[in-house]
Image (cartoon, rainbow, N blue to C red):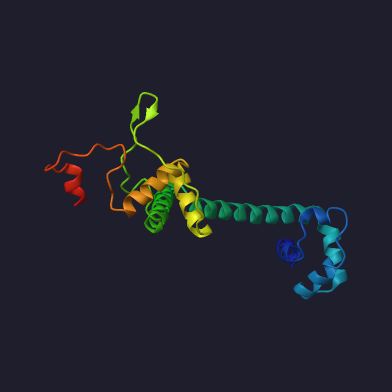
Amino acid sequence: MTIQEFVRRLAKVMRQKRLVPQDLAVRAPKGLWAAFAEAAAMKEATARSFWSARKDEALPLLRGIFYSVATKETVKGDKRAKAGAITREETARLMQELETRLTKMVNDKLRAALATRPPSVESRDLPPATPKEGKKFKGSKEDLRVRIDSELWRLLDDECARDLAGNMSRCLDAVLWRYYGRPRLSFEEPEPKGRRAPEDIDRA
């Protein structure tokens, strides 16, 4: 067996055992020569003697084999990394696609939420706002103290807080005004007899 063949077989056994040439610089790890002798079909003593006699020549060859293999694996790894690398342009395109998808998703959710939301007081028709005369409001007001169902109160209170800044008086005016067919309010001046106001025509 030539020294080159000896070193190649030894390198194969060492890779299987996850060993490197430095492990043989002082003393061979336990079990190495037994495994080598079995793989090379030779006696363990013969393998030991061969290595001891030609160690100075074999060790550089062994290091060269390991260096060559490590270099090839590094090059392959670099090629795989480059093949799987994403360019800056591709990254920008992917980010743009992600932003478009997220925007569409948010808009769809928002439209669905608005579609299921009950119409607010603000979106409905409201009675005319009470005008002022100097420091006082025109028209007359009545105080009201009543008891209503708790669920109706919750709905009314939520609606007022959300759409009329919590103005319960204004909210109740709107509800009752619509319920009674949008009547003329106390501060609104009646039209002369025989003449219908545009608001009355619209209400009719």
Q: Residue at x 24, y 36 (%)?
A: 189
The outermost residue toward the left is 194
Give the image location of residue 115, x and y in percent.
37, 57
The reply, left or right, for residue 24 in relation to residue 111 is: right
Closer-to-camera residue (181/41) = 181
Residue at (36, 47) in percent of width and height: 174
189, 159: nearer the viewer: 189
Q: Is residue 110 left or right of residue 10?
A: left
| Image x and y of residue 12, in percent | 71, 65
Q: Position of residue 194 (x, y in %)?
A: 11, 43
**Viewer-side residue, 195 vs 175:** 195
Q: Please name whichever residue, 196 or 25, is drawn nearer the observer in this view of the structure.
A: 196
Quadrant hosting residue 131: top left
Left or right for 83, reference 44? left
Q: Is residue 174 above or below residue 15?
A: above
Determine whether 157 is above or below 7 in the image.
above
Q: Position of residue 121 (x, y in %)?
A: 38, 48
Residue at (65, 54) in percent of width and height? 70
Inspect this view and state whether residue 89 appears: no
